[in-house]
Amino acid sequence: MSINTLLLNVHSDRNAGDLALSRVTIHQLETNFPDNQITLSMNDPNSYKGELPTIGSFFTWVLKGETWNLFRLAWLGPATLIPVLTWRLSGRPWFGVTPKKLQDIMRVYLNADLVVSTAGGFFRSTGKGLTFLITAYSMVLALLAGKPLYIFPQSIGPFNSWWERQLAHCLYTRARIVMVREPISIENLLACGIPKDKCLLLPDVAFGFKGATKEAAQQWLESQNIDCSNDRPLLGMTIMDWGASNPNFRRQDTYEDAMIAAIRIFVYKYRGKVLLLPQTWGPSKADDDRIVARRVAKRIPELYNSVMVIEEPLSPDLLQAVFGEMDLTIGTRMHSNIFSVTRGVPAIPIGYLHKSLGIAQIAGLDEWVIDIEQVDAKILTEKVVMIWSQRDRLRAYLKKSIPNIIKESGRAGKLVAQDFALLFETTF
């Protein structure tokens, strides 16, 4: 049986973590639905280099750069709801008030047999209510069109206002399956009145991402003039400008001071080298890790020979493999920590949202997480010294525990296929 699947909330391929999530999600769906035509709804469709059909998400319609188009916002509801209503009533959508770009999106919605919201961490209070509303509306519209909606493992919440919690309740109680990737997200759903038996806890699907080989990573490191045998130990870091992404965060300077202190102790105490690796390089400047990495490196010119700012973005395949060649990682980007531990490398996560702590709890590594609201030079350097002294024990632990987590992360697509098969049998 041929199946049309719409994959919602795909962000950008200029984020290696999001790209890894998308690839694993697509792989799981294709494996469990062999005759499956998947269409991606993307916030940054111009970044996509794959072979699947793509459409721009509603954000590409209502945003020009980072500025909201208020006329298009006001028109989004009528332009999308009328085709859905006429299609439900007569079997044929009426596009008389729907612009061409939205017609293309709506045809994909109406032709879909099932709709999947991709894995990620986007359904939460952002301080920008419109962002939350548009994200929710993309999923609500699937329900209004009568499509079965499945939520791949996500971080959900926190929600700061009553209307956000109410909207989450209305949405997720009507989804077929809601999968989350941390215990904290289940608590957030329960607080919204979602039945406990509706919520399934699965590891982040990126645990199942299979990147490049060890040889490919070593070859790349050698191209950067790093001798994998002699230039040891190696510390991989992801640094982000959380202050640019979140105006309420007032500790960006303190956070960067802490990262510099960690670099210094790693270089001076352990005679190591440090790679500042970009996991995200767009679509906005606030999302470009290279900008803050350059700023940090500029403040420690005396370590020029020991600290490398990697300017060229790496594919998630190669990035995961390179993290696997590190002796230690400090990751503010959550998926840099997942890339590391799946390759057996101890990691210190700097948590800027609850997802970092939650996923570390899944992996049994929560003692190493530092909240970005609390991190400072003293706390981080002490953590570096502590984890370095326990690195052999941690490597042995990861070798034993991570395979089970990887196996569990592969269940999401199977659960969707099993439920859809039951729904199909019931319907027909």
Image: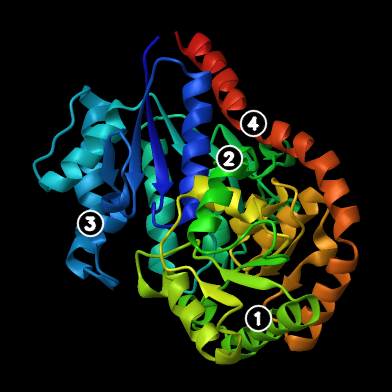
Q: Is there any visible trace of residue 45 in the rendered image?
A: yes
Q: Counting residues from the N terminus, which is met first, the one under dot 2 or under dot 4?
A: 2
Q: Which residue is mark 4?
A: 410
Q: Counting residues from the N terminus, which is met first, the one under dot 3 or under dot 1?
A: 3
Residue type, label 1 = Met
Q: Secondary structure at mark 4?
A: loop
**Label 2–label 3 contact, CB within 8 A:** no
Query: How far across and down, in percent of the image, does residue 419 sit?
Result: 58, 21
Q: Counting residues from the N terminus, which is met first, the one under dot 1 or under dot 4?
A: 1
Residue type, label 4 = Gly
Marking on residue 162: none
**Label 1–label 4 contact, CB within 8 A:** no
Which is closer to the viewer, label 2 or label 4? 2
- State the separation of the CA atoms marked 3 and 1: 38 Å
- State the separation of the CA atoms marked 1 and 4: 34 Å
Q: How is the image coloured?
A: rainbow
Q: Which residue is mark 3?
A: 61
Rendered image quadrant of residue 384: bottom right
Residue pictured at 71% horizontal, 79% vertical: 267
Instruction: Locate residue 32 relative to residue 375 in the image: left or right.
Output: left
Residue 201, placed above or below residue 415? below
Q: Secondary structure at mark 3?
A: helix
Residue pictured at 78% horizontal, 34% vertical: 404
Front residue (pair 403, 86):
403
- State the separation of the CA atoms marked 4 and 3: 34 Å
Q: Which residue is mark 1?
A: 259
Instruction: Locate residue 323 relative to residue 387 in the image: left or right.
Output: left
Q: Counting residues from the N terminus, which is met first, the one under dot 1 or under dot 2?
A: 2
Residue type, label 3 = Trp
